């Protein structure tokens, strides 16, 4: 059960009545997500990728049952879109993502053409790949220097350490090739009058080369559940030594690398949940709420840097310029712009576009800290 503790920083202590209302909102969201969260945490604990080293010369792409297949040696498996794109970028010719998506979505002949193109480019490529599979599906076609980490003990260490501060898991997302978790402290904060904010940790990792292991502070405007992922303060790229042909010889390194990461994650969890760190982020929200900005210019900058699409830029502008002061904080400031982006991300999550929704929440955090 989520409880509201008295904020150690009197400067940002939430009003009691508003804190009680916010607590009810958060508890309802946590309860609603409890089943799916438990399922994903169990999957993290039990899903272990199967690894093998495959010389490029032994890999071939085919099609069957309206799907692209990968054969390595005498074994054929389904292949995830992410792994297809990895194969396309690791060959002698980089096949564009748009071309891959068009061929995969058209018909059998187009998938045959994609398989042919992948085979041709790999035929002119030397070396070997690390193949990582789950449930008879190749989800990662990786360098043989990919630093493997076991996500399960890393997540367990973070949740256990955060639990010492009574933090709870708000949400979990399984994006097939990456995990995302959000934890919240029981404390509630009011950095701006009327704005009740929860604070915690955002965690992400990919066992398949779909991003580095990273942890960040996480900020949640409770009234509307707009979330923002603050700057990364822990990031570990999956690059290590060259793996042996017999993957079993690398198991000891696998375990040692994981235990080293577990220790670092414990340290980070303590650091990011420290009272001084929390106070610093609440001050950042207060400053952002007091900073007037030219939203049109700011959104144009996001578009010019390809951080949002044209359609997304228009949606953010509509959100920002609306009269809404429930889903968004009042004012013409950076705090409102961050929430306008986060609101779009929340809508993407509702529409089932989890990957893009999370990316927009991360962008909202960057805007809040001026990183973008």
Image: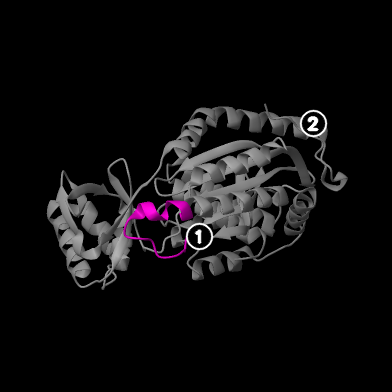
- Locate residue 109 relative to residue 213 in the image: left or right: left
The magenta stretch is: 237-253
Nearer to me, 347 or 28: 28
The numbered dot on residue 17 is 2
At 46% from the left and 63% from the top, the residue drawn is 240
Residue 297 in percent (x, y) is at: 59, 69
Residue 205 in percent (x, y) is at: 50, 51
Nearer to me, 304 or 199: 199
Where does label 1 land, which residue?
Answer: 313
The numbered dot on residue 22 is none
Identify the mark nearer the N-term, 1 or 2.
2
Is residue 269 in sight in this rendering?
yes
- Locate residue 355 relative to residue 50 in the image: left or right: right
Residue 301 in percent (x, y) is at: 56, 69
- Locate residue 85 relative to residue 189 in the image: left or right: left
Nearer to me, 265 or 18: 265
Nearer to me, 181 or 261: 261
Residue 214 found in image quarter? bottom right
């Amino acid at each position: 059960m989520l409880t509201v503790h008295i904020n150690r920083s009197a400067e940002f202590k939430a009003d009691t009545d508003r804190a009680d209302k916010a607590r009810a909102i958060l508890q309802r969201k946590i309860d609603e997500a409890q089943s799916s969260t438990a399922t994903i945490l169990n999957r993290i604990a039990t899903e272990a990728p199967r690894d093998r080293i495959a010389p490029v010369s032994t890999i071939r792409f085919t099609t069957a049952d309206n799907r692209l297949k990968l054969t390595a040696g005498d074994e054929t498996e389904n292949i995830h879109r992410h792994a297809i794109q990895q194969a396309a970028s690791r060959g002698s010719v980089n096949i564009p993502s748009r071309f891959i998506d068009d061929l995969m979505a058209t018909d059998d002949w187009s998938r045959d053409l994609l398989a042919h193109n992948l085979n041709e480019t790999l035929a002119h490529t030397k070396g070997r790949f690390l193949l990582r599979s789950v449930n008879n599906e190749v989800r990662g076609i990786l360098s043989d220097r990919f630093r493997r980490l076991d996500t399960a003990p890393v997540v367990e260490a973070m949740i256990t350490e955060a639990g010492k501060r009574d933090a709870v898991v708000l949400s979990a997302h399984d994006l097939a090739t990456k995990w995302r978790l959000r934890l919240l402290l029981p404390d509630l904060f009011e950095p701006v009058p009327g704005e009740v904010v929860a604070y915690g940790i955002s965690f992400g990792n990919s066992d398949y080369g779909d991003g580095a292991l990273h942890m960040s502070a996480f900020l949640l405007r409770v009234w509307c559940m707009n979330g923002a992922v603050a700057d990364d303060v822990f990031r570990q790229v999956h690059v290590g030594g060259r793996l042996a042909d017999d993957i079993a010889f690398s198991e000891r390194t696998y375990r040692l690398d994981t235990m080293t990461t577990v220790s670092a994650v414990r340290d980070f969890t303590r650091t990011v949940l420290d009272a001084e760190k929390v106070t610093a982020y609440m001050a950042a929200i207060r400053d952002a709420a007091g900073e007037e900005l030219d939203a049109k210019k700011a959104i144009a900058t996001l578009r010019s840097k390809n951080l949002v699409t044209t359609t997304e830029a228009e949606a953010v502008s509509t959100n920002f310029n609306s009269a809404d002061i429930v889903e968004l904080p009042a004012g013409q400031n950076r705090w409102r712009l961050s929430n306008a982006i986060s609101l779009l991300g929340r809508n993407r999550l509702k529409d089932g576009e989890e990957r893009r929704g999370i990316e927009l929440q991360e962008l909202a955090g960057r805007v809040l800290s001026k990183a973008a």
